[in-house]
């Protein structure tokens, strides 16, 4: 008797209202599934678990997780899907609100309180969404992303295709990335990065490097040259950083790296205070971290970007833009508009 396939298992778990997660790591073909046989939410305070962890932006720990006790994996080739040009819903009142926050951010930067801040907004796209189709379409469209579908009957249902690694730990080797700046992808792969994007990326890279230096000797930290990294219909400036170390305290590492400058602000504490006062948004799991933990020395955690919460008859998308002193509020709004198309293309 043949084993049930991914699509059959996905549908069974969803209809049974069980807690489960499906995910596929970047540049991999294997899709994993962890599922619970009961409904309670379970939490970890220190990542000393085995399973798939899902963290909120404002309270990274304790984080909810689904144990790997029930683990399935599938060699899955998603069906062909070209992607669609779906325009996000535009709410002019919310556009005005977003631009006002960007202008307030620019005032804070001009006064010297901030160097950079990521301002986010959400877009509610009202329509019936087929969860399985959306997930399999994302698998097809974004092979270089961390693609996941998370459902918990006592929690929420989220889906995403994140381009950004928080960090990967494999034995004694730690890797992470600094990601900032956004342009639309083009087939010629010719990009003209402006000073605003280059400066923003430099700040993110230097801040990440300084955070690592607080935990490790500077001589063991390696940083790549800046390069352009594709993420679906967008590209970003990127640096990859790595560390070889005998003992890595993952809880201390997590507290130092989250939130990254690519989703929060520089300086971090001032940025978080500003967001709490001005952003007028509960980010929930957007810009939190997520990913599989296979033990204290083996985990792949990602920043929860290009994601959405699924609610009855609607998809709630979360998007953000990095604001500096050179930001044009209208262009930043357009950037968030374009970022929302990552998920909408898979409908």
Image (cartoon, rainbow, N blue to C red):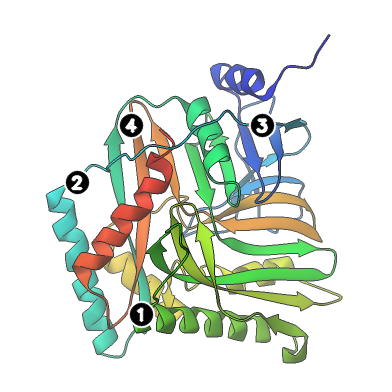
Can you identify the residue that label 3 sits on?
Answer: 77
Mark nearest the camera among 4 and 2 is 2
User: Quick one: label 4 or label 2, which is nearer the N terminus?
Assistant: 2
Residue 90 disc label? 2
User: Quick one: label 3 or label 2, which is nearer the N terminus?
Assistant: 3
User: Quick one: label 3 or label 4, which is nearer the N terminus?
Assistant: 3
Determine crowd level at label 4: few under 14, some 14-19, many 20+ residues with C-alpha closer than 10 A.
some
Determine crowd level at label 2: few under 14, some 14-19, many 20+ residues with C-alpha closer than 10 A.
few
User: Tags 3 and 4 in contact by the CB under 8 Å rule?
Assistant: no
Q: Residue at x 36, y 36 (%)?
A: 315
Which quadrant would the C terminus be assigned to in this image?
top left
Residue 268 seen in the figure:
yes
How far apart marks 3 and 2 lie (CA) works out to 35 Å
Mark nearest the camera among 1 and 2 is 1
Residue 332 rendering spot, x and y as whole percentages:
27, 66
How far apart marks 3 and 1 lie (CA) works out to 39 Å
Secondary structure beneath dot 2 equals loop
Which quadrant would the N terminus be assigned to in this image?
top right
Q: Residue at x 45, y 66 (%)?
A: 263
Determine crowd level at label 3: few under 14, some 14-19, many 20+ residues with C-alpha closer than 10 A.
few
Which quadrant would residue 254 be assigned to in this image? bottom right
Vertical order, 314 against 251 (above or below) = above
Can you identify the residue that label 4 sits on?
Answer: 314
User: Quick one: label 1 or label 4, which is nearer the N terminus?
Assistant: 1
Front residue of 187/61: it is 187
| In-image side of 302 versus 99 (left or right) | right
Front residue of 85/256: it is 85
Secondary structure beneath dot 4 equals strand
């Amino acid at each position: 008797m043949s084993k049930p396939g991914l699509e059959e298992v996905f549908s069974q778990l969803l209809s049974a209202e069980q807690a489960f997660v499906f995910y596929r790591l970047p540049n991999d073909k294997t899709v994993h599934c962890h599922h619970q046989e009961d409904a309670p939410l379970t939490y970890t305070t220190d990542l000393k678990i085995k399973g798939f962890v899902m963290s909120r932006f404002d309270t990274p720990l304790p984080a909810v997780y689904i144990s790997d006790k029930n683990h399935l994996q599938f060699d899955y080739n998603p069906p062909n899907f070209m992607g669609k040009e779906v325009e996000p819903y535009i709410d002019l009142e919310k556009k005005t609100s977003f631009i006002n926050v960007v202008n307030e951010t620019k005032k804070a930067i001009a006064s010297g309180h901030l160097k950079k801040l990521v301002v986010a907004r959400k877009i509610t796209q009202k329509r019936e969404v087929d969860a399985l189709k959306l997930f399999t379409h994302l698998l097809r469209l974004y092979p270089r992303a961390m693609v996941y579908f998370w459902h918990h009957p006592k929690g929420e249902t989220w889906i995403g295709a994140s381009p950004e690694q928080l960090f990967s730990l494999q034995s004694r080797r730690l890797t992470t990335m600094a990601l900032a700046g956004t342009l639309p992808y083009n087939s010629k792969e010719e990009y003209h990065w402006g000073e605003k994007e280059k400066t923003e990326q430099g700040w993110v890279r230097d801040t990440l490097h300084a955070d690592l230096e607080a935990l490790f000797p500077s001589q063991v930290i390696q940083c790549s040259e800046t390069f352009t990294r594709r993420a679906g219909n967008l590209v970003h400036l990127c640096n990859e950083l790595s560390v070889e170390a005998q003992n890595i305290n993952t809880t201390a590492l997590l507290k130092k790296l989250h939130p990254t400058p690519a989703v929060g602000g520089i300086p971090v504490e001032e940025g978080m205070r500003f967001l709490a006062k001005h952003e007028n948004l509960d980010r929930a799991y957007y810009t939190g971290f997520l990913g599989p933990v296979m033990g204290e020395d083996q985990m792949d955690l990602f920043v929860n970007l290009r994601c959405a919460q699924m609610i009855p008859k609607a998809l709630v998308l979360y998007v953000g833009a990095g604001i500096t002193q050179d930001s044009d509020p209208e262009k930043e709004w357009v950037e968030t508009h374009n970022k929302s198309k990552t998920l909408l293309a898979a409908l």
